[in-house]
Amino acid sequence: MTTFTAINLVKRPSGGPITKELFEVVQKEMPKTGPGQFLVKQNHMSLDPAMFGWMSADTNSYIPPVDLGTVMRSSGIGEVVESNHPDYSVGERVMGMMGWQEYCVSDGQGLNKVAAPLPDEAVLSIFALPGITASQGYFNVGKPKKGETIIVTGAAGSVGSIVGQLAKADGLRVIGVVGTDEKADWIVNTLGFDAAINYKSDDLDAQLAEAAPNGIDLFFENTAGPIQSLIVDRMNAHGRVMVCGLIANYAKDVPSPGPSWVSVLKRRLTIQGFTMPDHYHQVPELIGKLTPYVMAGQIKHRSHILEGLESGIDGLNLFLTGANKGKLMVKL
Ligand SMILES: NC(=O)c1ccc[n+]([C@@H]2O[C@H](COP(=O)([O-])OP(=O)(O)OC[C@H]3O[C@@H](n4cnc5c(N)ncnc54)[C@H](OP(=O)(O)O)[C@@H]3O)[C@@H](O)[C@H]2O)c1
């Protein structure tokens, strides 16, 4: 093969769904590997809600936007197919930032070897971004205690489903907020959450009161939306809010208003946002915290796999409609 396919970002989204006009599908010459370099064939590419932020023009965020005319940013798992690097052999699996392209050349910077004897889809669904994000937010930001009540939004998603299962295993009361009855059934009857609330249903405050009779101590926030302020108003004294994501705002020009500061003051709440690039140096510690739960069979997952690089474009819209069931990725 002398060429391969890559997808460049050429225009920034301006609210609403992602369209193919934002991207350019290009054929690139297969690169030569120089001394100390190796060639990776990407096999599974992760799709993440963070991509909405990376495509925007916002330079005041935790990571710079993707430059127009360059390969769209993404992480993935691939296999070394050619190597001039002493530490990387042909056939080894590697994981890290690879971009929306079938092949990439690396000197090893930013890539890690995949040691776990698990299929790519399980590694991306558990031990990659979803697991380390859940682990950082739940353990290090939330500081949970047995017997407390936690509510998780985006609870059937890749991050939320892991947070809820960690909390259940630790003896907390776990409530999940989701957008479909199928997801509500999955988190309660397959993952073991204590209760689920469909945020598209009526009487959300009454449902919260019933699901959390002792109030809410921990709020793992993935979505924002109208239920956010109702949750904060039901939090207990010294409650902690882990602000991980706000997907309801990602395709909006103006974010929805946040919760009342009256509850924050009266209940002496701690609200902390976190983003994983600040914590990449802690990955071994975070994986170390997560692994015993996985080994004990306490973390189930489901993956939603699309086929072919170009499916990533429309695939991003599944995050906005909630049509993804589990960790979204593209098989190349
Ligand atoms: N802080 C970090 O470093 C970090 C790292 C990874 C992820 N995140 C964030 O964590 C969140 C979850 O990410 P993920 O990869 O696990 O995605 P995911 O939960 O697997 O997929 C996104 C889900 O969000 C829900 N959603 C979409 N629009 C919504 C709306 N308007 N209101 C409420 N829910 C809505 C949908 O589920 P329903 O069907 O239930 O609506 C959708 O399936 C995202 O906000 C993401 O940006 C943050």
Image: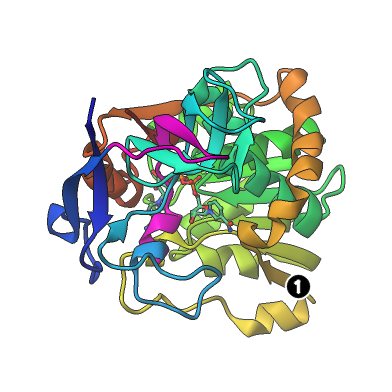
Closer to the camera in the image, 1 or 213: 1
Task: Please report the residue visible at 76 percent of the width from the left and 29 percent of the height from the top.
Answer: 291
Image coordinates of residue 3 in percent, x first then y, are: 22, 34
Indicate whether residue 32 is drawn in magenta: yes
| Residue 189 visible within the image | no
Query: In the current view of this chain or complex, which residue is farthest to the front?
Result: 35
Image coordinates of residue 289 in percent, x first then y, are: 81, 37
| Relative height, residue 196 to residue 60 (above, below) | above
Name the amino acid type tagged 1.
Leu
Task: Please report the residue visible at 50 percent of the width from the left and 38 percent of the height from the top.
Answer: 156
Badge 1 residue CB within 8 Å of ligand 1: no
SS of the residue at dot 1? loop
* The quarter of the displayed image where residue 325 is located: top left
> Which residue position is annotated with label 1?
269
| Relative height, residue 220 to residue 169 (above, below) | below
The span shown in magenta is: 30-53
The quarter of the image holding the N terminus is top left
| Relative height, residue 63 to residue 173 (above, below) | below
Specify few, some or many for label 1: CA neighbours under 10 Å numbering under 14, 14-19, or 20 or more: many
Task: Please report the residue visible at 23 percent of the width from the left and 71 percent of the height from the top.
Answer: 14
